[in-house]
Each structure stands twice: as C-alpha cells, then as structure tokens.
Image (cartoon, rainbow, N blue to C red):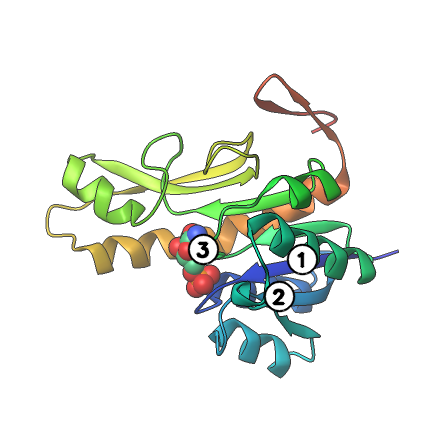
C-alpha cells in the first residue's frame, strides 16, 4: 500500500513540487496526504492545490505558544494518517509535541553540507566562509536545528563568480534530486539509526 506523506512548507514550495513530480513519474512510491503551511498565501499551498492535494493553513498566531501549535500540527497529521513528515522550506523549529508524535519520521532538507552552516541563509554563509564545495543534505529532524542523522547528501562546487543566487540555484537542483530519493530510502525501511548515523542495510 502506498505510504502517506505530509509536506510542511512556508513559502515557494519547489521541493514540494519535486516530490509531486517524483510521485507522478513513479520514482517515489508514495502519496501526499496533506500539505500544511504556517504562512498564509504560501506558494506551496497553490502548488499542492494544483496537484489535487489537500491543504491546510495553520496560523501560529491562533495558538498560545509553540507547543500548542505543534500539538495542533501533530493532531492534523495524525488525522490524515501520515506515515512520514517532510519539511520542505518549513521555516520553523519542530518542537517536542511533533517530534514525539512522529519519532524518526520527520525529514528535513537543508541547503548545505551539514554540519557546516546550519540555520538561515546557508548558501550565504558558505560564500562568506569561502568554502570550495557546498551542497544539500536530507536528514531526520531532531530538537537540534539542522542537526539530526543524515540520510543523503550531494556536493556542488562553489564557483569563483558565484553569488548567493547562483549558488542557491545550483544547490536547489541537487535538493530536488535527493529529497525524493531520500524519502524513498526511508519509506523502504532498510535502515536503522546507530548513534547519529543512518545505517543502510540490504543495499
Ligand atoms: C530550500 O533551499 C530548502 O533547503 C530550505 O528552504 C528552501 C525551500 O525552498 N530549507 P522551497 O520552498 O522548497 O522552494
């Protein structure tokens, strides 16, 4: 039976689009049960609606605190019978109520080779640091920002004339490639987490 994903987004939604297309192409054996945004008017909601996917907007201001918001999110995702939660440009720390509702079942995509440059504006950080290689990382979400066990990474060169925009665009191509692949790996289930490593078995 096809596994059910939730995608959580805050903005543009290009990674959501990559997941939608991977499912349509048969590269990813799953369905998207719901897309939830914490920003009104997020383009991700339009992309989901265009693909016929159920959407929901949760306004953080409607909740008395971080935990209350995450509890409402967990309730919505559980009601949608979600197997795996995919953060895709979700600009919010995931708190305990959500992590506990989906243990080792929340993935995130980040535009750097973690553990280098966690947090906001990773391509800008990479350029400012002067690294020659950056890339993209798919990892499990934990309470540590951008710090959980790594599923897949892809490296991209940093070119001498790169700007934040050109480097971000080159990294984004890799994000769109590895996120669906990482989701399939996690859904296939031939892995375990040992310490902070994701150990793949039978591959
Ligand atoms: C991506 O670069 C992702 O790695 C980061 O936020 C950006 C979201 O882009 N977490 P999009 O909304 O998927 O287009």
Taking the image as shown, residue 1 lies to the left or right of residue 35, namely right
Q: Which residue is mark 3?
A: 91
Residue 30 seen: no
Q: Which mark is residue 36?
A: 2
**Badge 3 vs badge 2, beta-carbon distance below 8 Å:** no
Q: Residues within 10 Å of mark 2 (few under 14, many from 20)?
A: many
| Mark 1 residue element | helix
Q: Which mark is residue 73?
A: 1
- Residue 50 at x, y percent in the picture: 61, 83
- Residue 182 at x, y percent in the picture: 60, 44
**Badge 2 vs badge 1, beta-carbon distance below 8 Å:** yes
Alpha carbon distance from label 3 to label 2 = 12 Å
Label 3 residue near ligand 1, CB within 8 Å: yes
Alpha carbon distance from label 2 to label 1 = 8 Å
Q: Dividing the image into four equal quarters, which quarter contains ligand 1?
A: bottom left
The mark that comes first in sequence, 2 or 1, is 2
Residue shown at 10%/52% (left/top)? Answer: 161
**Near-viewer residue (124 or 200):** 124
Q: Residues within 10 Å of mark 1 (few under 14, many from 20)?
A: many
- Residue 20 at x, y percent in the picture: 62, 67
**Near-viewer residue (64 or 91):** 64
Outermost residue on the bottom side: it is 50
| Mark 3 residue element | loop
**Near-viewer residue (171 or 62):** 62
Alpha carbon distance from label 3 to label 1 = 14 Å
The mark that comes first in sequence, 3 or 1, is 1
92 up-or-down from 190: above or below: below
* Location of residue 117 (image quadrant): top left
Outermost residue on the left side: it is 161
Which marked residue is nearer to the observer: mark 3 or mark 1? 1
* Location of residue 31 (image quadrant): bottom right
Residue shown at 48%/74% (left/top)? Answer: 42
């Amino acid at each position: 039976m096809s596994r059910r994903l939730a995608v959580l987004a805050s903005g543009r939604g290009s990674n959501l689009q990559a997941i939608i297309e991977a499912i349509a192409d048969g590269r990813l054996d799953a369905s998207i049960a719901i897309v939830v945004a914490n920003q009104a008017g997020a383009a991700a909601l339009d992309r989901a609606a265009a693909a016929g996917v159920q959407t929901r907007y949760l306004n953080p201001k409607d909740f008395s605190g971080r935990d209350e918001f995450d509890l409402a999110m967990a309730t919505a995702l559980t009601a949608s019978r979600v197997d795996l939660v995919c953060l895709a440009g979700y600009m919010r720390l995931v708190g305990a109520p959500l992590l506990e509702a989906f243990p080792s079942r929340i993935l995130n995509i980040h535009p750097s080779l973690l553990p280098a440059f966690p947090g906001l504006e990773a391509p800008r950080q990479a350029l400012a640091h002067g690294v020659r290689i950056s890339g993209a990382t798919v990892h499990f979400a934990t309470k540590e920002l951008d710090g959980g066990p790594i599923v897949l990474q892809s490296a991209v060169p940093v070119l001498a004339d790169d700007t934040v925009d050109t480097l971000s665009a080159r990294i984004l191509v890799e994000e769109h490639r590895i996120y669906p692949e990482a989701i399939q790996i996690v859904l296939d289930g031939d892995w375990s987490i040992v310490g902070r490593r994701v150990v793949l078995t039978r591959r």
